[in-house]
Amino acid sequence: MSKPKGFEKPAGVRDYLPHAVTRLRQIEQQVLACMDRWGYRQIMTPTIEYYDTVGVASSTSDQKLFKLLNNRGTTMVLRSDITAPIARVVASLLKEEPLPIRLSYHANVFRAIEEEAGREAEFFQTGVELVGDDSPEADAEVVALAIESLQAAGVERFKIALGHVGFLNGLLEEVLPDRLEDQENLKHDLLNRDYVGYRNMISGLQLSGVQTNKLEGILRLRGGREICKQALGWSGNPKACASIEHLCKVWEVLEAYGVSEHVLIDLTMIGDFSYYTGMTLEGYAAEIGSPVASGGRYDKLLKQFGRDVPATGFALKTNRILDGVQVKESENPLPILVQYTSDRRKEGLAKAAILRREGKIVITTLLTGTGEVRTAEQGLLHQGYEEIITFS
């Protein structure tokens, strides 16, 4: 393997130039401020975690993990999501804190398989976790907050799709009892939105007409509140029925929030992490096809860290919003240029300090003996300034 050139970087990672960083920080700050208004406190967790704890609990498959060894030979991982690290913290450092606990975050995560198909191996998420409440009110709160967070990020046209892991699991248990491999294959097709493969799989299972209709019919269970009512009679499985009843109650709360116009029910959606146990959500912006938000309920995850409490949450894919959505950019203030001769350097720098304390952006530069700006700074004069102050 040839040695990489000095300007090359690993596949799947990128450089963010100043204009992109400005926009990314704008999205991040506006979303975190929105979450703060809902009572979510910001938390930060390490970039590196133990494989045997957070790495395993995250439910990210091994081929998606970036693994490394520390100097003692212990296997570590770069975090592949933020939910599992927060579960570790809530079960340990916050174990005495009364429930429910509301936490927010913004961080980069790493998934090695994202290098395939040109996707990113490192990307940014901004999200929340609501721990200690298993009610429809809690699920509706995170959905309503996801909607307001997308609006805070500048996304104007979007939809939030809601599903429920329990409905699909219950229906498959009813139609395909004791056929776990077939159940998993069907779920795999739904996860990948391979509806042709899903139908072909059903046709090869030698099912009755009633069974086939139930499995194929869920592809039509996508829409508004009417889908909840239709799904209530779709399965006699207690798990499936309870799941739909829960989702109907979530919808009622979302109507009370006044945000149901942004929401649709999609009972083919199961979420891409195995730790989801209930409602799942995905947010789609009109400009791009891949999700800009995802999340759901994960009531069993914290038990792996010794604290058996329910939880729900979501994350925005902030770099996807940056790249694919036309957000309204705020006007950046022009800087003030303070230029000075060597004899008046102290006065010039003192003036710059005063202006910075007032919140101004200030660039300073030394004037040569001829009164001209140094060659290295000449290009700055063409950028535009709010004001030029000279000490000469």
Image (tube, rainbow, N blue to C red):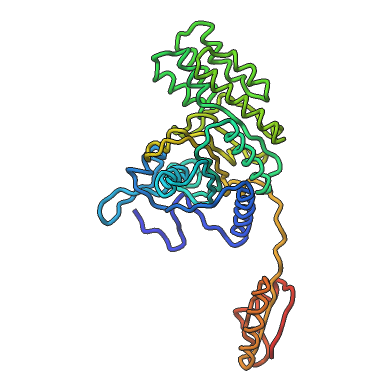
User: From what the image shows, is residue 189 above or below residue 18?
Assistant: above
**Does residue 146 lie above or below 7 as drawn?**
above
Residue 89 coordinates in the image, percent (x, y): 43, 47
Residue at 54 percent across and 26 percent down: it is: 164
Relative vertical location of residue 243 with respect to residue 298 in this rendering, above or below: above
Residue lying furthest right: 387
Does residue 182 appear in this view? yes
Is residue 60 at least partly visible in the picture?
A: no
Q: Is residue 325 left or right of residue 121?
A: right
Between 166 and 161, which is closer to the camera in this rendering? 166
> Which residue is depicted at the point 46% across and 26% down?
188
Give coordinates of residue 96: x percent, y percent: 43, 46
Which residue is depicted at the point 69% across and 34% down?
Answer: 262
> What x and y, as percent, mark residue 201?
47, 17
Q: Is residue 250 above or below residue 82?
A: above
Q: Position of residue 251 (x, y in %)?
A: 65, 28
Would you say 138 lies left or right of 73 here?
right
Q: Is residue 266 left or right of residue 57?
A: right
Q: Residue at x 48, y 32 (%)?
A: 276
